[in-house]
Structures are given as C-alpha cells and as structure tokens.
C-alpha cells in the first residue's frame, strides 16, 4: 500500500477555531483532501486562534508575526480591506511575509513535503515559488480574484506573472479570470478553472418544509467596498416606499461596518435593516432557505479589487434562494442563460430597485429561475467534484516532478 503524499497548504484566510465565522472554504478543501493526502495548513496566527494541532484531520500550524494582541492583519474583512482602513497595519506586513517565509523554510527542513499549494498569488505564491524551487518541490498556486484583480501596477503584474508561470499549475475560480490572465500576457504551464466548492448534498439544500418570507432581503458576506452594500441601502430607500414592511438582514462583519450603520441611520432605514453580525456556518442555510431574495450587489472597488466567484452566492444557489447579483466578471459561470434576469449594475440605484421589485412581484418565476440555476451548477460547485479535480491535479504535479 502506497504511503500518502504530503501536501503543505499556504493560506492567509483560515478558521481560527471550530465554527469560526471567517470563510471556511480553504479548510474545507484541506479537510476533504485528507482522504488521499497528509495535509498541513501553514496559516497566520491571530489574537484568539486555537493553538497548533489537528483540526478535522488537517495538521494546522500557525506562525506568529507580531505580539498576539496585534495579530489582526488578516481577519474581519481581509488583508486589503484592513490595510485600506487601518494605516498602522502596514507595519505588520513585513513581519507577516517574513514570518510565513521562515515558518515554511523550517517545515521544509524537518518534514518531507511532496507539494506546496499556495492560495493567493501574493504573498503566499511568492513564498511558495522561492522555497519550492529551492527544495525541488512542485507547487500549485490558486487565485481567488482579489489578488489577481486588485493588486495592480507594472511591478505587481510582473510578480504575478513570475509566480503564475513558475508554478507547476495554476487554478482560478472563474473562467473570466482566465480571460484576464490572457489580457495580462500571463501564461501558466497548466491552468484550470476550479471554483471553491459548496456542500450541496447535506448543508446548502432547499427546504420545502420552510416557507419563504415575502418581504425579506438578505446579504451575507464581508462588509467591504467590493460587496457594494451601500448601493443596496440606497435602493432600499426607494423600495420601502412601495413595501413598508420590507426588511434587509445583513450578516457579516468587516471594516466598513460602522460606516454602513451610519449610512443606515442617515437614510432613516433603522426600522428596515438588521445588522446581525457574525453567524455560525451551521446557522447560515436557514437564512438562505427563508429569505425572499439574496442580494449580492458586487462591484469593482476603486483599487480594482472584485470578487472571483463568491462563496455566499454559491451557498444561496445551493439553497435555491432567488438571487440578484452585481455584474462583475465571473458570475456568468453560475448564472448561465439566467444572467440577464438575475444580475444588475448596482451602481444604478433605480435599476437595482426595479430588479428587486420584479422578483418580489413575480415569486413563482423567481422560484423557477433559482431551481434552474441550482440544477445547472450542481456538478460545477459541489465539493465532491471540486475535491476530485484538485486531487487529480495534485497527483499530476507530483508525478511530473
């Protein structure tokens, strides 16, 4: 019987403890890959993270990059959003990068690693490239969108090109990202479109026994600029005139939270908007299963940052929740022929309000559309399929070494 190969995963976004409201998708992939590989996740420590150890069969190693009370670069909105709002956090960047570099270097000296999988081109991809080549280890780099779209400039583009083309393989989460790579003259040796997966069999599923509410909008995600929530709030001022009982539930946290609450008060929407903060992963399906519409008013932020393929949107689709999404590159992969009906430019407040009105006024058509979208995406985003594709790619890169 062949001994399992060992895959070391580099990431910045990773759950700090069980049921952490931070995004879980990288850990979920790691957990599922443990059936075929030994998986080590090298991730940043945080203010209140669990100690090193095994989590769902994944060996989690957290590296320190500052005194524990100051380790706040990654969480509550992500690195880019935190740097934009809290200028002092730029002081954490050098130690964050070097901490990860030396932690990986130490592991490679002590352990037999067969492949490195870096999530995000910068900084994880750079670190993986340097040490993988030095140690003659294949590496895969995955871009989730923000690192590819948001980090602009000639020098940064050259770094991204260098990392992508040095990797044994690169994956992106949407087909639109392959078009963007071509436009930037970036040509990885192997390029595959593999989104993060969703559990469409046991967790994010429709519930026929639950009644959808008639006048409840839902948003779930990080409270950052590229999510476009302020445009949804502005559209709500139009909608409540026609639907006085209309409410919006906002689930999530991030650096824009206080500004969004301030805007809510300024627009006199306190009676219509509920900021619910962080909700556990186990509770999320219920909100998707009962909301009238999941509204994801995504935009391209001023710095170019935008979504790759939003996990929350995929979760809503899994629960057959009617959806309205911003017209950012990549969502065509999910919406297909229903793109024109289920998407809108949220910067056009009246158009966003009209699109929401159309769904509220035609619930049967919205239900049929949501079911159609779910069926279309079943094989595309289900975790079993995603895990299988990553496992085959990992084996291929190890065997080609």
Image (cartoon, helix red, strand yellow):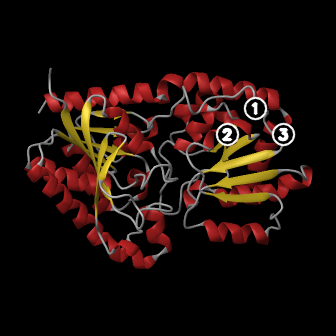
Residue at the location (22% across, 28% down)?
395
Mark 2 lies on a secondary structure that is helix
| Nearer to me, 153 or 19 | 19
Callout 3: 10 Å neighbours few (<14), some, many (20+)? Answer: some
Mark 1 lies on a secondary structure that is loop
Task: Report whether residue 99 is seen.
Answer: yes
| Nearer to me, 148 or 66 | 66
Circle 3/circle 2 CB separation < 8 Å:
no
Task: Report whether residue 343 is seen.
Answer: no
Quadrant holding the N terminus: top left
Callout 1: 10 Å neighbours few (<14), some, many (20+)? Answer: few
Residue wearing tag 3:
214
Mark 3 lies on a secondary structure that is loop
On screen, residue 50 versus residue 225, left or right, reads left
Q: Is residue 257 above or below residue 369?
A: below
On screen, residue 79 versus residue 155, left or right, reads right
Sequence-earlier tag: 3 or 2: 3
Callout 2: 10 Å neighbours few (<14), some, many (20+)? Answer: some
> Residue 286, labelled with which disc?
2
């Amino acid at each position: 019987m062949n001994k399992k190969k060992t895959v070391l995963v580099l990431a910045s976004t990773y759950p700090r403890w069980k049921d952490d409201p931070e995004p879980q998708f990288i850990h979920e992939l790691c957990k599922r890959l443990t059936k075929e590989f030994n998986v080590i996740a090298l991730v940043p420590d945080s203010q209140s993270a669990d100690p090193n150890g095994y989590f769902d069969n994944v060996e989690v190693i957290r590296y320190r990059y500052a005194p524990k009370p100051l380790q706040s670069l990654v969480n509550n909105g992500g690195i880019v959003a935190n740097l934009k709002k809290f200028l002092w956090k730029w002081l954490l960047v050098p130690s964050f990068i070097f901490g990860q570099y030396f932690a990986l270097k130490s592991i490679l000296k002590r352990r037999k690693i067969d492949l490195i999988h870096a999530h995000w081109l910068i900084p994880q991809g750079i670190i993986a490239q340097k040490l993988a080549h030095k140690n003659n280890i294949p590496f895969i780099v995955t871009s989730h969108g923000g690192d590819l779209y948001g980090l602009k400039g000639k020098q940064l583009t050259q770094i991204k090109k260098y990392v992508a083309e040095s990797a044994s393989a690169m994956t992106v989460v949407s087909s639109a990202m392959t078009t963007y790579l071509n436009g930037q003259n970036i040509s990885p040796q192997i390029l595959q479109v593999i989104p993060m997966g969703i559990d469409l069999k046991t967790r994010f599923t429709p519930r026929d026994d639950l009644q959808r509410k008639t006048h409840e909008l839902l948003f779930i995600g990080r409270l950052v600029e590229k999510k476009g929530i302020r445009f949804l709030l502005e559209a709500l001022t139009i909608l409540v005139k026609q639907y006085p009982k209309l409410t919006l539930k906002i689930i999530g946290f991030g650096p824009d939270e206080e500004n969004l609450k301030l805007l809510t008060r300024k627009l006199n929407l306190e009676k219509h908007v509920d900021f619910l903060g962080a909700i556990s992963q186990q509770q999320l399906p219920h909100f998707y299963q009962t909301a009238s519409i999941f509204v994801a008013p995504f935009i391209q932020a001023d710095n170019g940052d935008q979504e790759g393929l939003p996990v929350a949107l995929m979760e809503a689709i899994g629960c057959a929740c009617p959806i309205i999404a911003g017209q950012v590159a990549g969502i065509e992969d999910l919406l297909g022929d229903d793109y024109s009906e289920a998407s809108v430019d949220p910067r056009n407040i009246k158009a966003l309000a009209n699109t929401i009105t159309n769904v509220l006024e035609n619930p049967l058509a919205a239900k049929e559309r949501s079911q159609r979208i779910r069926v279309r995406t079943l094989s595309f985003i289900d975790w079993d399929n995603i895990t299988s594709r990553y496992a085959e790619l990992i084996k291929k890169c190890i065997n080609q070494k």
